[in-house]
Image (cartoon, rainbow, N blue to C red):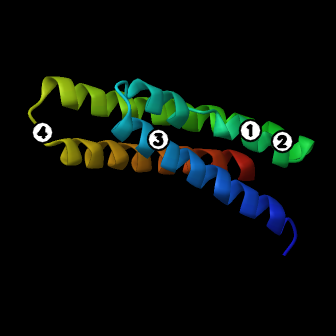
Amino acid sequence: MKNVGSLVFSFFVGGAVVAGVKYLSSNTDNPGLAAILGGLPTGLIVMYLVTRQDSVTYSHNYFFNTLILAAAIMAFYLMAIYTQLNKNLALSLSIGIWVALVTVNYMISKKKKTA
């Protein structure tokens, strides 16, 4: 297995981001700082590890997956503001929306690739 070092590095960076978001959201007066850290463009940073040829396909897919993530976040925000749904239910529904849209996007991109 090649590039084990980059996998280990990626694992620690991802864990540091998640731990940092948890810390900032729980221990600061401004949870917005946690959103800034959580919104780090890790997908862009990862492109340092992707070959030039693969980076074009990766960035194309990353763009559409970012739009899907934005839609899921908007769905959660709207449910939190305009409904009386429990936070965890609204979050679960938003994740379900994300899963459904990512699946559709994957199927469309797979179909385009074979066409």
Q: Residue at x 50, y 49 (%)?
A: 19
Furthest-right residue in this view: 52
Q: Are marks 2 and 1 in contact (CB under 8 Å)?
A: yes
Q: Residue at x 20, y 41 (%)?
A: 87
Mark sitting on residue 45: 1
Residue 115 visible at all: no
In the rendered structure, which amino acid carries the disc numbered 1?
Ile
78 vs 22, nearest the viewer: 22
Could you tell me which secondary element the residue under label 2 belongs to? helix
In the rendered structure, which amino acid carries the disc numbered 2?
Tyr
> What is the quadrant of the N terminus in the image?
bottom right
Measured in 3D between alpha carbons, the distance from the residue under mark 2 to the one under mark 4, in whole angstroms, is 41 Å
Q: Are marks 2 and 4 in contact (CB under 8 Å)?
A: no
> Residue 46 sits in which quadrant?
top right
Measured in 3D between alpha carbons, the distance from the residue under mark 2 to the one under mark 1, in whole angstroms, is 6 Å
Residue carrying label 2 = 48
Among numbered discs 4 and 1, the one appearing first in the sequence: 1
Measured in 3D between alpha carbons, the distance from the residue under mark 3 to the one under mark 4, in whole angstroms, is 24 Å
Could you tell me which secondary element the residue under label 3 belongs to? helix
Rendered location of residue 61, percent (x, y): 66, 40
Residue carrying label 3 = 21
Measured in 3D between alpha carbons, the distance from the residue under mark 3 to the one under mark 2, in whole angstroms, is 23 Å
Measured in 3D between alpha carbons, the distance from the residue under mark 4 to the one under mark 1, in whole angstroms, is 36 Å
Compared with 39, 109 (above or below) is: below
Among numbered discs 3 and 1, the one appearing first in the sequence: 3
Rendered location of residue 13, percent (x, y): 66, 50
Among numbered discs 3 and 4, the one appearing first in the sequence: 3
Residue carrying label 4 = 85
Could you tell me which secondary element the residue under label 1 belongs to? helix
